[in-house]
Image: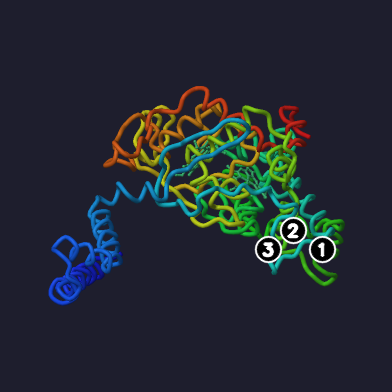
Amino acid sequence: MDNALLGIGLPAVLIGFATLAFMVHRELGPFAGLNVAGRWLLTGLFGMGFVAFGIKMAVALAIERLPEQTITPLLAMQVVAARGDEQFDTGFINPAPARQAHYVWEALPEAAPEPADNPGSAAKVALGKRLFNEKKLSGDGTLSCASCHDLSGHAGADARPTALGIDRQSGPRNTPTVWNAAFMSRLFWDGRATSLEEQAMGPILNPIEMGLSTSAEAERRLRQDASYRQDFARAFGDRQPITFARIAQAIAAYERMLITPDAPYDRFVRGDATALNPAQLRGMALFESTGCVLCHRGPSFSDAGLIGGESAFRIFPANATPYEKEYDLLLDGKRGVWRIASLRNVALTGPWLHNGSVDKLENVVRIMASAQLGRSGKLNTWLNDDRQLGKADRSPIGDKEVADLVAFLEALSSERLVAGAGKGRG
Ligand code: HEC
Ligand code: HEC
């Protein structure tokens, strides 16, 4: 209800009631022989609607005058999650993204979306697999994509803080997994690539990754090999020459097969109530109630997901905490803008974060809660003005909550990949 309506509505009610009172006291009352009390009673009876409407207006006016922060969280923000036999009353979280009262958990689809201009086929995927493991695509023939993205031994990553490229050069960033990259709308930690096709061209020519001199050199090396000429013909049609763009297309088609809809979490969401243990169920509820889902949402556990993703990037670390020094999280002293990382298989892909500086998942969870959700014990966060109403708890999350959240993150690991993890190259 806005002020203009109140400005007209309230006087209208008052005038209406005054007119009624005047009529009853001057005409109806004397006519019926009523005394003063009787006349007011009759006015009240006739005017019931006016009285009720007037009270409603007054209440609306009073509510509207309350400070905004007092009322909006009450209406929109209370998130209560119940899982198993425990109930979590979570208080209020970041108001802005409260798009729905209850978060909807989604399983990973059994197939990744593919672009119209690069449909997959068995021949293309087989070629992509061959290229993914092809060391000829590196300058000195020592590295393939699989050298850093160890699919079974390290869940598609390399278990190093930052990547080790050609000539044993150390890169600046941690190697993310390629598993389920096909579900992301943005690739790389800073989200600079928008498709797997675009992404695949990067590392081959990157001087500190595979370090090949030119794209023409990649084409030349593969064209020399009769079996590659045959494989490209099968994948792209007989007359197609081998081009750098097609190398990338084949690799991307293969990567779209590298998906893991077989995590315990997915089985749970698809209806197997026994798929998660009690700690994981508590962690799942906490993941929602603590506010992780504000960013890590949808089947990819990232708002940078192709399915349902809306805003891919966030400032990280968003709030000042001692962690930023401890783990060197700033870029040249500034807060960076990063893609929201997917959390699929995250328990298998440590060390974590863009610089690979954190080697315990517990600590990543603590960093996230404090840097991204203001759980740092300071009061000057989202709910600054309504302490008395909001009962918001901004203290750091406790060890038990951290353990439960980690248990839940472990439920996002593919069972196949867990079986292979740590066994080295496979
Ligand atoms: C030297 C190690 C290394 C090699 C070799 C390598 N990568 Fe990567 N890969 C990385 C690193 C490091 C990143 C993150 C870079 C960044 O964010 O700036 C990355 C990112 C990616 C991503 C994005 C994943 C995501 O979630 O954002 C994909 C996909 C990928 N690489 C595929 C490939 C393919 C395909 C090849 C071979 C053509 C390849 N990589 C070769 C280290 C490597
Ligand atoms: C405001 C957005 C936001 C919220 C809320 C948030 N995160 Fe994150 N999260 C990010 C971003 C951005 C990154 C990538 C950081 C980087 O690039 O180093 C990330 C990274 C992570 C990673 C590391 C991924 C990897 O592969 O290294 C984990 C684990 C994680 N978040 C878990 C959580 C948990 C658990 C919560 C809730 C307690 C949470 N996050 C809340 C934005 C958020």
State whether label 2 is within 8 Å of ligand 1: no
Q: Inspect this view and state whether residue 276 appears.
A: yes
Q: Residue at x 41, y 41 (%)?
A: 92
Dot 3: within a 10 Å radius of its alpha carbon, few (fewer than 14), some, or many (20 or more) residues?
some
Determine whether the residue tagged by mark 3 lies in a helix, strand or loop: helix
The x and y percentages for residue 126 are 82, 54
Task: Name which of mark 2 and mark 1 comes first in the sequence.
Answer: 1
Name the residue nearer the viewer: 115 or 23: 23
Name the residue nearer the viewer: 198 or 121: 121
Which residue matches tag 1?
A: 235
Name the residue nearer the viewer: 370 or 317: 370
Q: Quadrant of residue 208?
A: top right
Q: Is residue 20 above or below residue 175?
A: below
Mark 2 vs mark 3: in front: 2
Determine whether the residue tagged by mark 1 lies in a helix, strand or loop: helix
In the rendered structure, which amino acid carries the disc numbered 3?
Ala
Determine whether label 2 and label 1 are within 8 Å by CB: yes
| Residue at mark 2 to residue at mark 1: CA–CA distance | 8 Å
Dot 2: within a 10 Å radius of its alpha carbon, few (fewer than 14), some, or many (20 or more) residues?
many
Q: Quadrant of residue 1?
A: bottom left
In the rendered structure, which amino acid carries the disc numbered 2?
Ala
Which residue matches tag 2?
A: 250
Which residue matches tag 3?
A: 245
The x and y percentages for residue 324 are 39, 32
